[in-house]
Amino acid sequence: MRIVRILPWMITFRAIPTAATAAEYFDAALLNDEERAGVWVGAGAANLNLDGATVGRADLERILSGRSPSGRFLPERNRADRRCGYDFAASPDKSVSVAALCLGEEIGRIIRDAFKAATKAIVAVAESVSRRSDMAHGWATGGGVITAAFTHHASRWGDPHLHTHLVTANLTSNDAGWRNFDPRGWLIARKDLDRLFQKDLARRLRRARFLAAIDGRGYATLPGVPDDLRKRLSQGNKAIRDAIAKHPCPARIRPDIWAGIMNDRIRPEKPPTPDFDRTLAEEVAQAIRNAVKAAPAAEGGDDGGNDDGEAETVADLIARRVRDTMPAASVRATDLLAAAADLDDEGMGGHDLNTIARALPIAAGMSRPTVTPARPVAVRIAQAGRIAANGKKRAKPTGGSGAAKRKVAQGVAARKAIADAAKKAAIPTGARIKQAAAKRRNDAAKKGKK
């Protein structure tokens, strides 16, 4: 399976091959108890009364197979080649991983809880741009997802590497029922989701009285962790860089995808999770504890996720920014998310992702984005009929592989079939609309002469 790994970003993505493989991986004996204790998140999980519950292996396998915990198949269609789900992994900067895993349980628990809260909140924000799709209705934006969040502590090279697997089933829910989950909405918005995630993590760490900052790359960091220690505990990145130096990226492949290919080729089998408490000498650990903790309260207050007035204020900021930067007719859900990410901390008022997640639907109502709806079959038939009637046909294939020629031929045949269906259904096509307009002009001209 080919991984798509974006090294400059902290949110990565891969497709899950089978439900059984995922269930076995996240319940493996080499993980510790905290790593195996996954939690259900997402509006789709709430619809099944799973939100906040501990993930069981049997339930995970059923959900990834498209079934409810009781065994009922949820989507309208049950295809044999149906994709079971996707794994979105969120990770912090190495300094946060070192502080969360190597400085003792007291500090580590606080940092890990802040990280878990930020990853749970990013799912609620991502639902504003999630896509649901099926063959009959096309695709549309919005829909609750079913996600199992597993937080792991180690990389495959045995380094401290805090990361959460957001195992998202190929299911979304809304008032129309259950549909398949299309990951392209999340992938398009991945950069903005990552920016929001990093800002939110930094806020949560500051509220917990840690000296957190956003560095030049946009990452939430703890500057008190020495740079040389970060590099020493980053064997995975070093191995990938060495592999790329030995096998340079071809011109036809993006560097980020090539880095993912190298990662797949060289990474070892996942080892048992080490006990990182003994990674650092006590005097070094104590010095870092003193460096990352703030004496006064750095940022007080709760997580700000329960005030409707705050959500409306943030929604107004987002909607105004969108109105000022683009025409109303072209606004999409991903544009609202990008506007939220563009607003700096002062403009956002220091609100975290819980508030932003509730503000985005309100902002959508204010700006009325042109969220692409699922097109009914009749509309798609009419559009294809107008294209065929106006003579906009694809050129016949003259070269290329046999598979490419067959694909083009199949597309031409499909468009012809749709055009014939439009004609039989008496749906107005472009030529008929033009004829009707010309007739109206002629009638008007005749009346004028009289």
Image (cartoon, rainbow, N blue to C red):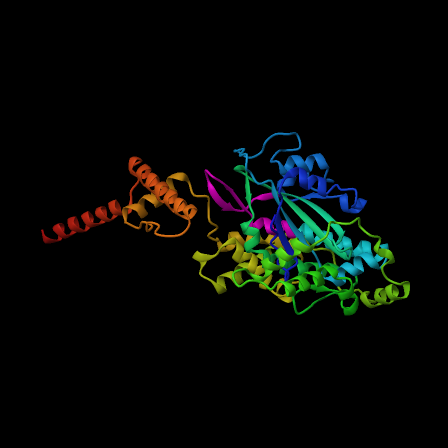
Q: How many marks?
A: 0
182 is higher (above) or lower (below) than 209? above
Q: Where residue 53 sits in the image (x, y, percent)? A: 72, 40
Which residue reaches farthest right?
282
Residue range corresponding to the magenta coloring? 122-145
Q: Where residue 4 sits in the image (x, y, percent)? A: 60, 54
Residue 315 picture quarter: bottom right
Residue 361 visible to an observer of this rendering:
no
Residue in the foreground of this view, choosing between 43 and 260: 260
Q: Image check: 207 left or right of 169?
A: right
Q: Image check: 393 left or right of 290?
A: left
Q: Where residue 377 sits in the image (x, y, percent)? A: 40, 39
13 is higher (above) or lower (below) than 82? below
Residue in the foreground of this view, choosing between 291 and 234: 234
Q: Where residue 27 sits in the image (x, y, percent)? A: 74, 41
Asked if the stretch drawn in magenta spans residue 130, the answer is: yes
Q: Residue at x 84, y 53 (%)?
A: 275
218 is higher (above) or lower (below) than 40? below
Residue 20 picture quarter: top right
Residue in the foreground of this view, choosing between 57 and 72: 57
Q: Image check: 111 left or right of 445?
A: right
Asked if the stretch drawn in magenta spans residue 163, the answer is: no
Residue 88 visible to an observer of this rendering:
yes
Q: Residue at x 37, y 41 (%)?
A: 414
